[in-house]
Image (tube, grey):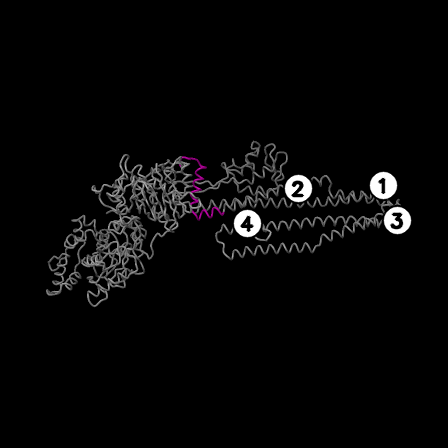
Amino acid sequence: MPEYTKYKRGSEWRKWDLHIHTPETKKNDQFAGSTIAEKWDNFIKAINSSSEEISVIGITDYFCIDNYFKVKQLVAENTITKKFDLIIPNIEIRVLPVGGSGTPINLHCIFNPNIDTEIETRFLSKLKFNYSDADYSAKKEELIRLGRDFTGNSSLNNSDALKAGIGQYVISMDVLREVFEKDIKLRENTIIIVSNKSTDGVTGIVKHSDFFIDKNVSQLEATRRSIYQFSDAIFSSNPSDILYFSGLGVDSKKTVIEKCASLMPCFHGSDAHKNENIFNPAESRFCWIKADPTFEGLKQTLYEPNDRVKIQALKPDVKNERYIISELEFIDTGNLFGNQKILLNENLNAIIGGKSSGKSLLLYSTARSIDPEQVDKADKRLDFDGYKFKSEYDFKVTWKNGDVDRLNDNQPSHKLHKITYIPQLYINYLVEKNNKEDLNSLIKNIILQDSAFKKFFESRTDSILETTSEIERLLNEFLQVRQKGNETFQKSKQLGTSENIKKGLTKIENDIELGRKSSNLTEEEFREFNRLQLEKSELEKSLREIDLKDKALSKILDELIKTKANLLGNEDEEGEIDKVLLKGQIDRILQESSVITPDLVLIRDKIGSDFNTMIANLVSEIKKLNLETVEKQIIEKIGVNKIAINPYLIKLEGQKELQKLTSSLEVEKLKHQQSQELERQIESFKKEHENIRKQISILLNKRYKLYKEIEKEVNDTKNDIGSEILLSCTLIYKEIDFPFFEQVNKASISSDHYFNTLFSKGNVNYGLIPILFEKPLKVIDDKLYFETNKYFPIKLKTDFEDILRGLIKDSFNLDYSVTYKGDDLLSMSPGKKGTVLLILFLHISSFEYPILIDQPEDNLDNRTIYDLLCQMIKEKKKDRQIIIVSHNANLVVATDTENIIVANQEGEGVVVRAGRYKFEYINGSIEHSFAKNDGIAEILLSQGIKEHVCDILEGGNEAFKQRERKYSIK
């Protein structure tokens, strides 16, 4: 296919210097050289040696274009070797009234270079200046005549006379208007710019905006305004001017349009009058223009003054190369697609074409080549089986960083890039799921497209999961403690209280004393016998304490080792951490934070070292206690005691009753010790029970607050989408999802019962649940007591454990609400709802990778909100590359699409000629324009991109007119 356009990525940012003078400029020529020839030689060297990449230059002079033609000739002859995409004529003129410094106001007329040979006859010769009752045009010979007449020197040489004439040539605005009113086509091929200098060569910049915001209105205010209203743009790099004339300054867009007749772009150039200034604007304020380097491209800045021009040092809107698709390529040996390559723009690419022209096919092939898994999911939801052709083809997506994705490469490990793909009717599919649950899920997925919010959300949900896990662990521990406490209480109840047992012991001791008096033992022997018995009891008690102490210390050591393993991971036999299977909490936290720095690793290692020290110290202290040796010594003492007490037992053998009492005393003493131990355990269980209950209460409150933090973050950062679209979030816990609500016997609940404060409008007032859980809850006779005389009536056979598990259950929901101008999303029409969802998605998503959207206008039915969608796309394309398929002219034109891809399919039965394919594509900028040429057989090549838009898209002509009128009343 022949070359359709040189600018195959559409409108791109390029440096333009629209204001550069040359040697022989008619005012303030400071170019180095002792002769004209030397000046031009030095000028050419300065141009050729410049390292700046300048796409377009505007050769500027006063009422003259001779130097413009000379530069063109030097370029054509390759004397100027530096490459430019375009050289454009800029004629600087001076008009009345005079400015504050006593000099006329400077205007620049930039002409379409396509009519450069007509400028003298259609413009310069039509201007009029009156001096001494004689009229002079701005043709060269007339300016020379004026110079000689003004100086009174008829023999003045042509060069000096020309400069003298130009020095005096000042025209009125009426003359300038008349010229353009009589030649409308000339006006269409001219851009008029108000100069930013008070006088030639003066470095001080006058702020144009001061003319409009100064409260002291001068007598020339109306005249000044009329000049701005007649002009198209401003020559100024002053930030306040840039803001003001784009409608972003102290006056609104409406006010600026009322005062100036339109918003206007601000241009800037080097205004070079000497070699050092060539392509070297003050403060590196380069003029970046996003357009084809053509006159029509420059005119686009008049329609999009905010987005098409930037005055700054560096290239605007730079994106990460990893997230930019550079080119698409069909790979086909047949005549279905051939090996067509399509270059993409970094911003907005629109694919247009007639029905079945292959526009959706191109987007689908792109999406499937990059992320087949995402495309498969979408196909399944939409019941779409893909595109089928008799012959196979491959498709290649090349990213700006050099990475390549191919359609026929289905290896998941090769798919390293991500996209957001919204196929045709996908929004409709989402809209049709018209219920709150699906809406909440959809909104959640949309707001999670914001990477900052996603990070915040995931950190909170991770904390919620950890908190819930800890709550469940504590509840299990609580139930175990409760069970052990109950079992211990039953044992204590069966054994009797230590107080009652003590009373029994006293009676037995008294009975033994009476029995001793009638026994064979002397008083001294009996005292020794009792001492040995007491010694035996103490030794046995010490033995039990040793056993308990050993078990307690072993448990402490186990818990310390478990805690270390939980935080740092388990160790293998060599003491190395298993990084894959046995990561601890600290390792996971460091990994998730994505900021693993050496100092953090040192802290982690220090924690591990401290744990090892604690464990080693505990083991050392346990060894110091020497419990095993002490235990052996006690056992030996018990043996000695047994030998010593045995003779007394033999003497008492005949005293059966006394012996029985003595044995009973030992048993009761043991029972007393056991009873005391059980009572101590019961008190310990009570305290542990209460402590765990409080811990659970604290964690329930913590979890509730974590959810509230998410609610607050959404409402603080996502609430105002713009243009009256509002998103709000409410944390709810539906009573139907709360088991306790069903466990309570509500028929027995009075209107003033505490139960009613726990619920409101179908939801749980969950802030009260942690308070309730902290109370000493217990079930007695189908009543859940939470205070001594206060209880909830519960249904028969409701298990206490089930009640507790119901109270801690996490059934929270983040309920989202979206409104547009007060209308709730769920009550909107499907089209309006779909558009709001798409706008919501585009606004919130902060990912950098490309967005691919197929015909979103199928969801549009409201003009007002459609305009909002266009604005949203214009804003989002600055951050993310967008590829959109559309048959809506306004969606393509109003978004100022940088690159338009036109698709075409040869009709059925048409024989595809050699070098042509059934599906063909061309692309270019919106400013690429030429009328249809019936002599060109290829439909795609027969007219410009703009003309294709007007032909293919309904309302295309009107869309362009609306765009041109958007910021103007001209």
Task: Kindly identify the amino acid type of the residue bearing the numbered disc 4.
Answer: Lys
Q: Secondary structure at mark 1?
A: helix
Left or right: 731 in relation to 85: right
Task: Kindly identify the amino acid type of the residue bearing the numbered disc 3.
Answer: Thr
Q: Please name which of the two marks, 4 or 3, marks the residue nearer to the observer.
A: 4
Q: Secondary structure at mark 4?
A: loop
The residue tagged 1 is 657
Q: Secondary structure at mark 3?
A: loop
Q: x and y percent of residue 558 in the render?
A: 63, 49
Query: Height in image: 385 above or below 42?
Result: above
Q: Secondary structure at mark 2?
A: helix
Task: Kindly identify the amino acid type of the residue bearing the numbered disc 1.
Answer: Glu
The alpha-carbon separation of the residues under discs 2 and 4 comes to 33 Å
The alpha-carbon separation of the residues under discs 2 and 3 comes to 48 Å
Quadrant for the N terminus in the image: top left
Circle on res. 879: none
**Label whose residue precedes the other's in the sequence (3 or 1):** 3
| Quarter of the figure with residue 374 | top left
Q: x and y percent of residue 757 in the render?
A: 54, 38
